[in-house]
Structures are given as structure tokens and as C-alpha cells.
Amino acid sequence: MARATRRRSTTSKPSNATAALDRPVKLGNPRMGWASDAIAEVTRRLNFKYMALVPGASYRGFHDSIVNYLGNTNPQMLICLHEEHSVAIADGYARVSDQPMAVAIHTNVGLMHASMAIFCAFEGRAPMVMFGANGPIDANNRRPWIDWIHTTKDHGALIRNFIKWDDEPQSAEAAIESVLRGYQIACSKPRGPVYICLDAGLQEQTIKNDVKIPDPDRYRPAPPPAATRATVRKAIAAIKKAKLPLMLVGRGDRSQAAWDNRVKLAETLGFAVLSNLRAGSVFPTEHPSHVVAPCVRPPEENKALVNRADLILNLGWLDFAGFLRLCTGNAQTQTPIGAEVINVSLEQYLHNGWNMDYQALAAVDINVLADPDTFVQQMLDELGVKGKPTGKPRLKPAVKRMRHWTQSAAAKVKPKTSGPMDPQDFHLTMSNFVCGDAKLSLCHFSTGFPGTAARWRSPLDFAGNDTGGGVGSGPGQSVGCALAYRDLGRIPVTMLGDGDHAMGVNALWTASRMRIPLLAVVMNNHSYFNDEAHQHHVAEVRGRAPENRWIGLRIDDPAPDVTLLARAQGFDAEGPVRTAKELAAALARGRKVVAAGGRYMIDAWVAPDDPAERRRSDGGRGEKK
């Protein structure tokens, strides 16, 4: 029996309720007098709206400056319950807004907590400026025991392999430059997190009146790298000659202008288009040019399109060479495919050899070291294309003859009206809810979300999933996305796996504390089921019993109570819901609460799918048979 919903008074808060929270008193007319005041002033002039944090004495001086010098405005503190969630919230915020959030992290222990989320942010190319703290560096100023164990010779060494830059300035003047430089580096493409470690002793030093804060406009990031005109012309000429040109769209800017430019280029040059499901809404999936459904790993019809194409334009696809290998079945990733390949990417600027996130090396014919969205604009300028997309592309004959994915049998499947939900029922019900409402935006999807459920119609429809592959990141990232979506006038919805939710659930407390609206739905199959599919595969390969795949993986007996966990974070909640009909009704109730500024959680029980079929449907992750 479904547990009754209990409504809370928080549902009536207005959408701008965060700004009214935690207002300091007796500010008077504060003057810059401490090194931490100067650092705080730079963050204000760079227009950081928010700073996510878990409090810590190592940056007590900086904390005081944010509150009693800046008045807890620009940035406003977003208090969190775990450093990993602080970074994840900043990650989610950047995914929607393309803007950095500030994060404060308490000395070495907080940084160790935060490290997985930092890795995920780096893999997602999310800009953020993280402020850490150390010391005091001067040993004579350390308190016994606690200051000694929290002082580390090289904080940045903990995370240097998966950030863009770090620094530990030793004067107010150096700290001002460090913040300006950190902002510039974080926001320069390819974007990513930076880390600035502030000596506790430095923060609490008085400063002289002659310390100046320069005009931050002189330290803004430069325009992203562009291609030469000769390269642009060469690419256009190759595309015009192609009989079936294919545009692969991966990670891209979230702006309407960038979205429109991709569509205009596809319409003008007659591309077939395929977008990466994990990258978010970067192209209208129902557009005539988007002939196959978006994907992460390619189903058969997507493989067929890739193999038929005689030219491929890669605009930031995630793991481009690995994707081509899945499509072609080549024994080596270095084996060239039949199509001419134009590869547009800046990713090699971040490759350092510590992690294999550079993926396989693609064989390409025209290698363009430029920002993909900048290159699209360059091609449009060279072609003289202006105005808005028309929705009526000049499709090449080979593309025009293809049946659009929206006309396929898979696209017309509907969720069952009765009986227990399977993953397909769950995802289709979620798609009907989110994609059928122009005011809703999706923060995150759960494992197994099919491309045929992704009906994106604007760049704000979907923020894109975590690209770090860690469990527990979804709740924090969803809160950050929800904050950015709220500020853009959208109603945020997120899907979470039960394992992801259980590991990161207290990130949701920040949404309640800071009055951030969010509708969250847990796809609850009571298992780390992705690993059940792996264990099934290994057992079959070894001639052992696949029936034992569940041992050590089930989240059951007892099952964590999703609704009680949500209520403990300040959410309204209901569940379990067991059918698609019950889920649809719960979503309608939740929408009303969230539209009024509240937070709502639904526990959706889903029957586990076939683990062997899951491995087949995702291409077996490219494993050798």
C-alpha cells in the first residue's frame, strides 16, 4: 500500500526564496581591512552568485568576509552536509548555466571528501573556482594538534591530476591575482575546475590601504580557439561533396544561439544528425535532420547510419573513436572507417596521462583544434547563413530517403496501463511527463533511459548526465541543476537510481534549506543492478551459475525507505508507486508542489530487467565476445 503524502509548509515559498535567507544584521558600512576581505571582494566583482560549502575553521577568515563584509550576497552561501555535495552542486549549476560557482572546502580532510565530485566535474568540463584552506603555514601560529594535522605541504597534489590549475598565494596581492587567474582558467575552453588554497594565517592578516582590486573585465577569458579560414573552407568543401554527411553532436554550449547555430548548419549542408544522450539537449531530437534517436552506445539503426555515412563531422562527441569502433566492429580503434572524418575538439589540451579519459585515438582526415561551437559559427559565417533555423533542412537524397526515428515502432511504444512497471514503462512515463511540458527541465536520468524517450526541443530541456561514472553524484548535481533552472524560470525534475540516491541523499537537504524547488523520482529496483548484469556476464563466460548474480548487490532486506529519507531532508514524499498509472498521477501531484516552490520525492518501484539483455542492448560495453 502506498504511504500517504504529507505536505509541508515549505511548498508555499516563492521561487526567489533563497535570496531572503541568512541575511546578516548590524553590517553597518564595512570597510576592507583583512586579506580575506580583498579575496571576497574579487569574488563579488567577478559576479559569483553562489558559494557552496561545508563550514570549516580553516577558512573562518574568508567565511567572515563573505558574511560581514559582503553581506552574504554575490556570492550567497549554500550550506551543504558533505564536501562532495558542495562540488556536485557547483557541477550541476555549470551544466545548465555554463557559468562557474564558487566552492569552499575545509582543509585537507574536506578536500579528500570532495575529490570524487571534483573528478566528475573535470570529466564534465564544468567551470568552478574552489577555495581551499591550509595552515597556518607559519608553524608558530598553529594551534596544538588540530592545526598541525590540517596543514599539508601541497594540497593541490591531492587533486592536481584532475583539475586545470591550482595555487597557494602568500599575500593579499598574490591572492587577488590568483582569484582572477583561476576564474580566467576555469572559464577558458575547455573549461574545468580550479583550486585556490588560502593560508589560514594569510586570511586573518590586516592589509594596507594601498591594496587595490583591479577591474575584472581586463581579466576575462579570451574567446575560445577558432580554426583558420583555410580549414573552414576545406571542411565545407568536403561536406558539400558528401552524399551522406553525418554530424555527431556531443558536449556543447547551453545557449539558444549555439543551439540555433547547430540546427542552421545541419539544415544548410544537408546533414543527418545524431546527438549524444549523455551530453544533454544540444540539438532538437525530433528535427527532420536528427534521423536516428540519440544514444550513448549505438543500437543497430545508429550503427547502420554511421557505416553508411561517407563523411562524419564530430562536434565534441564523448569517446569518438570508441563509438566508431562499436559501430564498425573494427578489431582496433586505429583502423580508419570508410567515411572521411572531420574532428573538431579542444580536448587534448586537458590530457595529462594520469587518467585514460582521453579515450581511444581516432583516425581523422581533417583535424580541427578549435572549439566546436566556434567552428560551427565560422562555417555559418563562411556560408553567409543568417537568421533563425527554418525546420526545413536541405536534406541530401540519401538522408531524405531514411525513415525518421519518430516513425519507428520503438518510438511508438507506450507504457503498460496496469501491472508492475519495468524500466521501459518507467522511462516512457517520465518522458511523457517531462517532454510534454515546456516548463519542465530534466536534471539527470537514471540508467537505461532510451534515446526514443529523449524528445528535446530546447537547450534547457536536459542538463546532461554525469560523465565521471561515479555513484552518488546524481543528487548533488540535480540540486545544482535545479538552482540554475529555477533562476532561468524552469521547473526542475530529476531521475535517480536507488543506489545513487542512497549514497548521496543528504545532498537534497541543501535544496530544502536554500528553498530550491525540485521534483525527484527514484527508479527503485532494490539493487546495484548494473553490476548484476556484469556478474551475470562473468558467470556465463566462466560456465558458472548466473542465478547467483544478485549476491552482494541487492539493496534490500531491509530496503532503505526512500520516502522517509526524503522527508528527513525536508522533502514532501510519496510511494512506493508500482504502476505507470500510479507514477503518472504522483508526478502530477508533485508538479503542483514544485511549481509552488516546494520539493517532492517519488519512490517508484521498478521490476529488474533482464541482465543479459541489458548487456546486449548497450553493445556489451564494447567487450570482445
Image (spheres, rainbow, N blue to C red):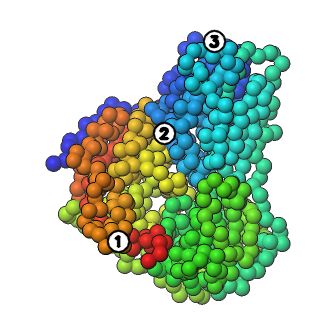
Q: Secondary structure at mark 2?
A: helix
- Gap in angstroms between the C-alphas marked 2 and 1: 40 Å
Residue 390's x, y, as percent? 61, 71
Q: Secondary structure at mark 3?
A: loop
User: In this rendering, would 315 be left or right of 22?
Assistant: right
Q: Secondary structure at mark 1?
A: loop
Residue at the image point whose x is 61% and y is 71% from the top? 321
Residue at the image point whose x is 67% and y is 31% from the top? 153
Q: How many badges with numbers are in the image?
A: 3
> Residue 365, relative to residue 103: is it above or below?
below
Single out the mark in the foreground, 3 or 2.
Answer: 2
Residue that carries the numbered disc 3 in the rendered image: 28
Q: Is residue 269 visible?
A: no
Q: Residues within 10 Å of mark 3 (few under 14, many from 20)?
A: few
- Gap in angstroms between the C-alphas marked 3 and 1: 73 Å
Q: Residues within 10 Å of mark 1 (few under 14, many from 20)?
A: few
Residue that carries the numbered disc 1 in the rendered image: 542
Residue that carries the numbered disc 2 in the rendered image: 85
Q: Residues within 10 Å of mark 2 (few under 14, many from 20)?
A: many
> Residue 52, relative to residue 229: is it above or below?
above
User: In terms of depth relative to the viewer, which is nearer, 271 or 277?
Assistant: 277
Residue at the image point whose x is 52% and y is 26% from the top? 55
The earlier-in-sequence mark between 3 and 2 is 3
- Gap in angstroms between the C-alphas marked 3 and 2: 34 Å
The earlier-in-sequence mark between 2 and 1 is 2
**Disc 1 residue type?**
Arg
Single out the mark in the foreground, 3 or 1.
Answer: 1
**Disc 3 residue type?**
Gly
Residue 597's x, y, as percent? 41, 38
